[in-house]
Structure formats: structure tokens, C-alpha cells
Image (cartoon, rainbow, N blue to C red):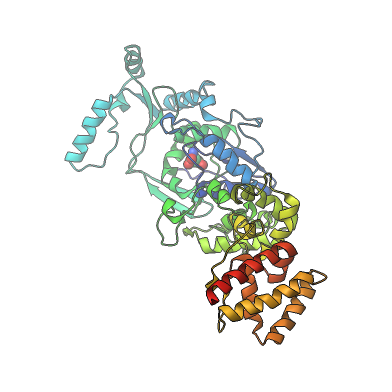
Amino acid sequence: MPATGKTAQNGPARVRFAPSPTGELHIGGVRTALFNYLLAKNTGGQFILRLEDTDRNRLVEGSIDSIYDSLRWLGLDWDEGPDIGGPYGPYVQSENVSTGAYAAAAEKLITGEFAYECDCTPERLERVRERQKATKQAPGYDGHCRTRSRDELAESRSAGNDIVVRLKVPRTKTATFEDAVRGRVSIKYQDISDFVILKSDGFPTYHLAHIVDDDAMKITHVLRGEEWLPSVPRHLLIYEGLGIERPVYAHLPVILAEDKSKLSKRHGAVSALEFRDEGFLPDALFNFLALLGWSPGHDKEVMDRDEIASLFTLDRVKEAPAIFDRTKLEWMNGQYIRNLSLDSLTDAALPFLEKGLPAHVARPVDRDRVRPLLAMTQERMKYLTEAPEAIELFFEDSISPAPEEIIQKKMDAASTAAALESSLQILRGFEPFEVEPLEARFRELATQLDLKVGALFGSIRVATTGRRIAPPLFDTLVALGREKTITRMEAAIESLKAVAG
Ligand code: GLU
């Protein structure tokens, strides 16, 4: 078989992401979109979105919106597509059926004797399958209609029979082609039978449709999941039959979970929108996904979009499966959260706060009020979903921690109550009520009371926040304000006294 195709990556690339709207956009699909986008950016080319919806039985309502939302959220903006148009539309395959483009391509293949019409009934195909099973032959179409004349088929059509178009597969041959990721690949035709390219309702199958469209849209590089690699021999036959040059192929490595099984729901979030809803930043996911099957050639992992795009070339795409390391993604998200300006963090966190803060907090959430609170937790946040929990303590009227939580090591209820009493006296009149002076004064108090700083601060922390781990103590007290701090301290002292008896 001819191994035609542009193998060098030079000049602006025209690439496409061509999802089928059959459900939520899975992370594997997003990675494919991303690599296409990056190649377009790297070469100053175009990134095209095309919807492949010819398999009408598999359509899932809402998935087109989910595709748009996922790509937009990640900032993978397309240059041409169904919603914005472009010079080579339609960008939705079902809309291209009525233009006759696919039927014309099928006709050309029939005329060139690369394809033929077939009116075999489902019953006949079933009998063939059973016979193959009984005689332990590989399943597949037996070529029954290959030798029938077009007149015969025209007659069959007039009689109301369903006619499909099948491609002739040379089963004794081997397809050899170059893949930009895998190098030279050889696949035998022996397991491929004459397959359908045009269905009886005039809809093309994927194999024909994507080739007609890629050609019409002047696609230079096809980057897609490696599950399509075994189909390449079929595609080469179609290119040959149509007399057109194929694009550069780059089959991207599969993404596996850490246990090396296929990444699925049981491993956690798998669709882009789930990651969004779990509080990941689009920039972090963008960066993380770029490293799933591609390497920049150095060890630096946190890179912004432009840097990644400037380094992205196909020769750095790896062949081996990419492992989805969730811990690394969490770490990376934390890095991105830390690097946000406080305003950007506030903007990103607001939708999560609207949803997650207790009902008694006024809506819409007061941006100016939460901004300084977020500043305190920014260092420790790994997901935006942690924001409500991290700051809700500032909105509660009372927090009522259990006395045993307030009591620190080597202390009891009475000594803790006494320490908090002394603290309360200071808090009532201390000026200025600011972080550094407060901290200095309370360190002094620990010495005066002969307590470990950690023990004193720990009791105050639990008394005022209800938590052992909270943002830095005096930042917290200042954010709470003197009044709330005092009320909480008073309540804590009461509860300790009740236990002390
Ligand atoms: N519609 C195909 C899919 O969703 C696209 C494959 C390709 O990129 O050619 O997997």
C-alpha cells in the first residue's frame, strides 16, 4: 500500500478536534483537543472544531453543550466551528449529508472499483456470521456483493431494498505508514472485511465522513487517540481511492489510571466539567493534561499556556501510555491557586462560595468581605471547593467546640479556662487590634503564665475557630473582629468551667 502523506511538520498546521456528541467530554477527548490546539498555536495555524454526529443512534442530548462548555472553560478556543462558521463549513457532519458530499465520494469510490453497493439483508448477514462461527472463521462480511453488477443493484434498490456501500479490502496485503508519534507502522488487512462507508439512509460512517471533511477543510495533521490506529489501513484505502493526499498522522497515547487500568468513573472525575465542579482551575488542568503524553524536554512542570505552546512539537509526544496521576494534579492545582492574584482567586472562588457557604450568609456573597478571608487560606488550598469550608467560620454566630478539643497537652479544664480568662482580659482592651502587636502580646502572656506558646495559641485557636487547624491565629482573630472573638472566648470559658466543676 502506498505510504503517502506529509510526514514533516512544517508550516502552519490546520488541525481539528472532531468529537462525536455521545456524552460528556471525557478527559481523553480533552487531551486530544488540547494537543491539536497546541500544535495550531505552535505553528501559527488553525484549530477547528467539527461535530461528528453521523451515528444517529449514539447521540446523547446535551452533549454538544457539554463539548462547548468544556472547551471554553479550558480556553481551547477554536478558529472555525459549528457556532462561528468558517470558510469550509458545514462543521457539523449531519448538515453535510444533504450537500451530497459523502454520496459523491462514495460514488467516486464505486466508479474507481474501490467500493461496491450491497443489498445483503440483516438475515443474510446473520447467517454468514453463524456459519463463520461454526467453522471457526474470523467474523466479517463475506464479499457476496462484490461481483454483482450495478444494474442488478439498481433493480434491487427500485424493489425497495436497503443498499449500503462497502469498501473492498485487499485482505492479503499489509498497510505500512508513518505515524509522527510511532514511526513506521505496519498493519495487516487480513482481519478487516469489506466495511460499510455509506449507510442505506445516505449517512456516511465515520471512516468515509472524516476523510471527506478533513480533505474539504484542508486538514494537515490528524491528532487523535490511539484507539484509531487499527483503522488507519481502512483510511489509506479511501485516500487512495479518492486520489487525495492524507494528512500527517499522530496517534496519541492512551491515558491510564495509576493502577494501569482504563481511566474510568471509579477513579474519580473523568470529564472536564467534573474537574471544573471539583474546584480545579482551568490553567492547572491545561498544564497537567499537556504533560499527559508529551514532554517539554526539561524537568520544569509548571508552565503557562504560552510556554507550553512554544515548546509543543510532535516529536516530543510519547508512545507509551500516559498515567493519570491525581496527586500530581492536586499538587499542581495548589500551585496555580497560590500563584493567583487575590482578585483572580476571589473571582474563581465566588461561584463555589455562593453554592457552599451556609444559607444564613447573605447572597450574593459580599466580594469585599470574602477577599481578605481568602487571602488567609490561599496558601493551603488545593481546590476551590475548599473555599466555603475554609472561611465559613467567620460567618458563624457561635461555634461551640467541645471542651476537650480546646484543652491542649499537659493542661486541664481549669488551667485552660484560666489561660483563656487572661487572654480575654487582654483582648477586651488591646489596641491596636492588629496582627503583629497582638501576636507579640500573646507570646508575652505565654511566658507570664509559664505556658508553651503552642498550647496557649492552640486553645485560643480552637476556642475562636472550632478547629485545630486554621489560618494563622492572629490573622484569624483580626478578621473575626474583636467582638466575635470575645463572644467565642467567653463561650469557651463557660464550657470549660462547666467541665472543671
Ligand atoms: N469522532 C471521532 C471520535 O469521537 C473522531 C476521531 C478522529 O479524530 O478522527 O473519536
Q: Nearer the viewer, residue 278 or 219?
A: 278
Residue shown at the point (61%, 51%) measured from the top left = 357
Query: In x, y percent, where is residue 477?
Result: 71, 67
Q: Nearer the viewer, residue 156 or 245?
A: 156
Relative to 284, residue 72 above or below: above
Residue shown at the point (52%, 59%) measured from the top left = 318
Work out which quarter of the rendered image holds the C terminus and state it: bottom right
Residue shown at the point (67%, 65%) measured from the top left = 379
Residue 326 can be seen, yes or no: yes
Work out which quarter of the rendered image holds the N terminus and state it: top left
Farthest residue to the left: give it. 134
Query: In x, y percent, where is residue 366?
Result: 72, 49
Q: Nearer the viewer, residue 466 or 79?
A: 466
Q: Quadrant of residue 197?
A: top left
376 left or right, relative to 269: right
Q: Nearer the viewer, residue 488 or 352?
A: 488
Q: Quadrant of residue 144?
A: top left
Query: In x, y percent, where is residue 376?
Result: 70, 64
Residue shown at the point (55%, 33%) measured from the top left = 213
364 left or right, relative to 120: right
Residue 462 can be seen, yes or no: no
Query: In x, y percent, where is residue 251?
Result: 50, 50
282 left or right, relative to 153: right
Relative to 39, residue 474 above or below: below
